Amino acid sequence: MLLQVPCLAVLAFASSAFAAFGFTKSGNNYVVDAGSSNPLTFTVNGGSCDITSIKFRGVELQDRQGSHISSGLGSATVSATTINNQYVKITCQTSTLTHYLVVRSGDSTIHMATYISAEPSIGELRFIARLNSAQLPSEYPYGAVSTTSGSSSTVEGSDVFVVNGQTRSKFYSSTRFIDKDAQCVFGGSDQMHVCMLTPQPESSSGGPFFRDIESNNAGAATNLYNYMNSGHVQTEAWRTNVLHGPYMMTFSRSGVPTAKGFDDSFWGQLNVQGYVPKGSRGYVSGTASGVASKFETVIHWYNSAAQYWTKASSNGAFTSPAMKPGTYTMVLYQTEYKVASASVTVSAGQTKNQNIASSLPARNTVWSIGDLDGQPTGFLNADKQQRMHPSDSRMAAWKPVTYTVGSSSVGQFPMALFKSVNDPATIKFNLNSIPAGAATLRVATTLSFAGARPGVKVNNWSATTPASPPKIDSRGVTRGAYHGNNEVYDFSIPAGTLVAGANTVVINAVSGSSGATFLSPNFIFDSIELFTAGSGNENGNGGEGGNSPPPTTTTAQQPPPAATTTTTAPGSQQTQFGQCGGLGYTGPTVCASPFTCTVSNDWYSQCV
C-alpha cells in the first residue's frame, strides 16, 4: 500500500525559521518563498499570471513553458499581498476570471482557487502545471498509460499515440470524480512527488462519474492538470459565477499525500470571491435503501450552482459533504445507474434529514447478460478500455460475436459495438416454453458516439429503429471514456415472436453517420436482458444525463490483468517511493532494502 500522508497536516504552520517566508518583487515578477523545511520557491509573471519558475529543494521543476490557467491568460492584472504574516496571496484578474495562488508559511504547497463569470472561449477551464520531464518523468496512479514521450506514431487525432508498441494518451490518466484523490508526477534521486489534489470539485460539471485528463509526460514537459470544465464527454452545462476550488499543488518527499480531511477554513481569512465557509453551509443525511449489496450505493446532489456526492455505508446511511445553501435534485444510483430522485433544500448551519429508496419496477428476468449498473464491467475488453485504445494489441480481438445464453461467459460479449468493426452481436437462447406475459428485450447502453443506437431483430421480427440519442460532441470509447447519457432501449416483442426451443437476437449499431474502424458509430453496452413484467428482480430502468445517474446489474467480473514484470539487471534497484511494477512498466522491479514492491493497482506498484 502506498504511503499516505495526510495532506499538509505535518507541514502546516511549521516554523518559518527554515527560510524567509514571504514574497519579493523582482522586475515584473513576484517571487514567493514558502518558508518550508523542504524549501519551495516559485515565480509568478506580473503581467500574465504564468508561473515561470518552481524550485523545490533547490531543484528547478518548472518547464520552460509556463504553468497557468487554460492555455495562459495572456495578460492579467496581478497583485500580491501578505496576510497576518501567515499567508501570501497572489490575485490574477481578467474581465471574466480571477485566479488565486496562496501559500501558507511553512507549507510546501501552492493552494489555488479560480472564480469565473464565463467559460473560457476555448471551452476548457483547467490549471496546467508544465513541469520538467527530466526531473519528474513518472506518473501516478496509473503509471505509463499516459506517458506519450518517445511516441513512434499517432493512432488517432493528435492525442493518442504508440509508444513501444502500446497505445498511450493523456486521456488514459483519468479517474472518476467520486474516486479521485492525489494525481501525481514524480522522479528525481530523492523521489520528489508533485501532486494535484481537488478535495471537492463542487463547481465543475458532469457529476460523480465524470473523468478528465490528469497527467501526461509528453516528452518536452510532464504536465499535471486540474480540469475544472471541459467538453470531454460532457453531459451537463458548465457552471459559471462560481469559485472552483480550493485545490492544491503540493510538493512532497514522503510519498503520495491525500486530500481526505483537508481543512480549507483558512481561506475564510483571505477575501476570496465566491468562497463559502463551512459555517455558511448545510448538510443532508439519511438512509438509502433498495440497492443490492453487490452494487455501490451512491447519492448525488446537483443544481445550477454546485454538485456533491457521497457513498452510503453498508447499512445505507449517508451524510453529504458541506453544501452551499439551495434546492437540489437528489439522485440515488446503484453503482452508476439512476434508481431514484427527489428534491431537497439545504439551509446554512442545518442538517436536513431525507431518506431515499430505489423506485425501480420489479420484473421477471428470463435471461440477462451483464448487470444494469451503468458500467460495461465484465464485458470483453472492459478491463482494459479506460487505459488503452481499442486498437491496442493487448486488447482481445474485436469481431462479430455469437453469444449463447447458458454456455457463453459474460467476458465473451463485447463491451462496445462498432458499426465498421464488430457489428453485429448475436445472442442465441433456448426456451422450454413461451414466456407468460408480454416480453421485453432491454438493451442498456452507457455512451453513444455518432448517433449510434441498437437496431434489434428477434427471430423473424425486426424492431422499429429508435431515434438518435442526444449528441455528445466528443470522442468517447477511444479516449477511455464509458460514461455518457446511459440510454436504455426497451423493445416490446410481439406475441408469437418467441418460440419454444431455439431463438435468436441480432443487435446492430445503427446510425446515419459513418466512420472508419473505431471512429465509426458505436455504443457501449451496460447490459442486455429479456424479461416479462412481474414481481421478480428490481434491476432498473434507464438513467440519463451527466447529473442524471447510471445503471445497475449483476455482471460477471473478469479477473484483473496481472501486473507485468520485467527482468531486473543485477544492481538495478528502485529507491523508496519509486515505481516497481504495473502494466506497461519496464523499469526496475526490485526495491532497495528494506523496501518492498507493493501493488497499488493493476497499473502501478511502488517501493514502500
Image (cartoon, rainbow, N blue to C red):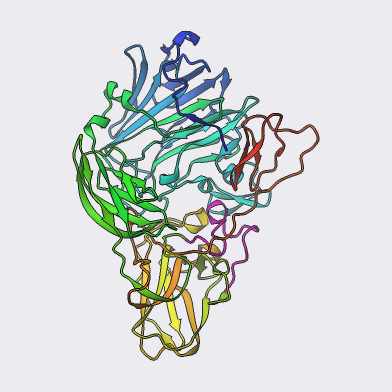
Above or below, comparing residue 222 to residue 501 in the picture: above
Q: Along the horizontal axis of the image, is 411 left or right of 331? A: right
Identity of the residue furthest to the right in this view: 570
User: Is 171 a magenta residue?
Assistant: no
Q: Quadrant of the C terminus?
A: top right
| Residue 492 coordinates in the image, percent (x, y) | 35, 80
Q: Specify whether residue 36 is in view.
A: yes
Above or below, comparing residue 335 to residue 250 in the picture: below
Residues 544 and 217: in front is 544
The magenta segment: 376-400
| Residue 146 coordinates in the image, percent (x, y) | 57, 44
Q: Quadrant of the N terminus?
A: top right
| Residue 168 coordinates in the image, percent (x, y) | 59, 49
Q: Quadrant of residue 463?
A: bottom left
Residue sitting at x 46%, y 64%: 554
Q: Along the horizontal axis of the image, is 398 left or right of 567? A: left
Q: Along the horizontal axis of the image, is 583 left or right of 247? A: right
Residues 463 and 500: in front is 500
Residue sitting at x 58%, y 32%: 186
Q: Along the horizontal axis of the image, is 245 left or right of 381? A: left
Residues 266 and 531: in front is 531
Q: Quadrant of residue 222?
A: top right
Tell me which secondary structure the magenta stretch mostly adopts. loop
Residues 378 and 225: in front is 378
Q: Specify whether residue 450 is in view.
A: no
